[in-house]
Image (cartoon, helix red, strand yellow):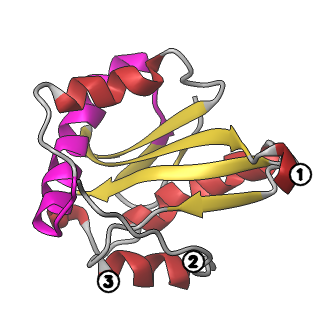
Amino acid sequence: MGVSGSGSVRIRLAGVEDLPAAATLWQQLDAYHRTLGLAFPIVEDAPQKWADSFQRTLGRFSFLWLAEQGGQPVGFLMARLKQSPAYLGAKQIGEISDLYVDPAARGGGVAAELVQAAMQKFAELNVHSVEVQIQAGNDRGLDFWHKHGFATDLTLVRKVL
């Protein structure tokens, strides 16, 4: 598994054995999204269901990187491959579905290193483009992605019935 990192933070491609640690971090990300008004109900065992959603495809169509500091996970990035519809050229698209760094580990470039690892993988896979969805109200997140060369391309609106 690939390893990179500067200073005391280590970025590495994660395996199935790392899913429990990543799911614990994902739960913190989910809690943050809920403070912003995430429009979906809280689901019992959501962290496990999140991990289960990509476990079978890990390393083939889905990729998980962990950031570790002192041997402890402090962040992660989850990415997937998908395909655009035929009427849009059936292009292979990269999707960064989740990115989280523990507040105590922020400010040192950990998120940027995680993104760099994902972008390198997507470049190796020759994807057409990379997508990221940002929860409404997450202005810091939107600024982060813009600083990393992403441009606003689509606005999603939702009405809960």
Label 3 vs 2, first from the N-terminus? 3
Start-end of magenta stretch: 12-39
Main SS, magenta region, reads helix
Residue at image x 53%, y 84%? 147
**In which quadrant of the rendered view does residue 72 lie?**
top left
The structure residue drawn at horizontal position 24% and vertical position 23%, both measured from the top left corner, is: 48
Is residue 25 located in the magenta-colored stretch of the structure?
yes
Element class at badge 1: loop
Q: Residue furthest front?
A: 161
Q: Is residue 70 visible?
A: no
Residue nearer the viewer, 123 or 108? 123
Give the spatial CA distance, label 3 vs label 1: 32 Å
Is residue 159 shown left or right of residue 134? left
Neighbour tally class for label 3: few under 14, some 14-19, many 20 plus, Cα within 10 Å: few
Helix, strand or loop for disc 3? helix
Picture disc at residue 89? 1
> For mark 1, does the 10 Å Cα neighbourhood hold few (<14), some (14 to 19), or many (20 or more) residues?
few
Question: Residue 130: x percent and y percent?
Answer: 66, 59
Farthest residue, direction right: 89
Instruction: Quickly name the residue at label 3.
Output: 139
At label 2, the amino acid type is His
Q: Look at mark 2 in the image and give the residue it sits on.
A: 148
| Image-based side of 36 in relation to 156, left or right | left
Kindly identify which numbered label has been placed on residue 69.
none
As shown in the figure, which amino acid type bears the numbered disc 1? Gly
Residue 122 at x, y percent in the picture: 71, 49
